[in-house]
Amino acid sequence: MERIREPIRVAAVFTPGRTIRPVWFDWQRKKHTIIETTYSWREKCGENLLLHFAVADGQALYELVYDTKNQSWTLYGIETS
């Protein structure tokens, strides 16, 4: 997986029970519609809780990270076939 680590804009649905589901994100002036979330996990980084999402748009697999303290999204990496 190629590491990117760039801030991005994400549209997400916050469902009851504190579940977050990313729907689309902007990267390199292109809107990527998420068709599948393949995996998600949590990581504690000091006092920050980071929520990781492995998502696919039909072209590539991306790792999106939501920082719950700063309420910001980062594209951590991309894997193309």
Image (cartoon, rainbow, N blue to C red):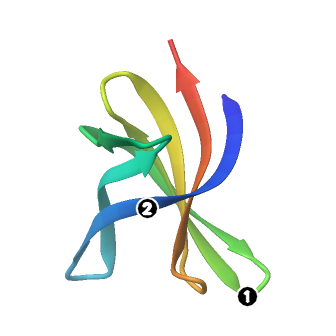
Residue at horizontal 59 percent and vertical 84 percent from the top: 70
User: Mark 1: which amino acid?
Assistant: Glu
The location of residue 27, given as percent across then percent down, is: 47, 45
Residue 56's disc is none
| Residue at 24% from the left image edge and 38% from the top image edge | 35
Position in image of residue 24 (x %, y %): 30, 51
What residue is disc 2 on? 9
Of 9 and 49, which appears nearest the observer?
Answer: 9
Residue 63 position by quadrant: top right
Extreme residue in the left direction? 16
Q: Nearer the viewer, mark 1 or mark 2?
A: 2
- Placement of 37 over or under 1, stated as above or below: below
Disc 1 residue crowd, few under 14, some 14–19, many 20+, Cα 10 Å: few
Asked whether, in this view, residue 39 is left or right of residue 35, the answer is right
Q: CA distance from mark 1 to mark 2?
A: 23 Å
Near-viewer residue (4 or 39): 4
Mark before the other along the chain sequence, 1 or 2: 2
Choose top left, top right, bottom left or bottom right for residue 39. top left
Residue at 71 percent across and 38 percent down: it is 3
- On the image, the x and y values in percent for residue 81 come to 50, 11
Q: Is residue 78 left or right of residue 46?
A: left
Position of residue 21 relative to residue 18, above or below, is above
Q: Quadrant of residue 72?
A: bottom right
21 left or right of 68? left
Q: Is residue 45 above or below residue 31?
A: below
Q: Which residue is mark 1?
A: 47
> Given the image, on which type of amino acid does mark 2 rest?
Arg
Q: Specify few, some or many for label 2: CA neighbours under 10 Å numbering under 14, 14-19, or 20 or more.
A: some
For this orientation, the residue located farthest to the front is 29
Quadrant holding the N terminus: top right
In the image: residue 45, left or right of residue 24: right
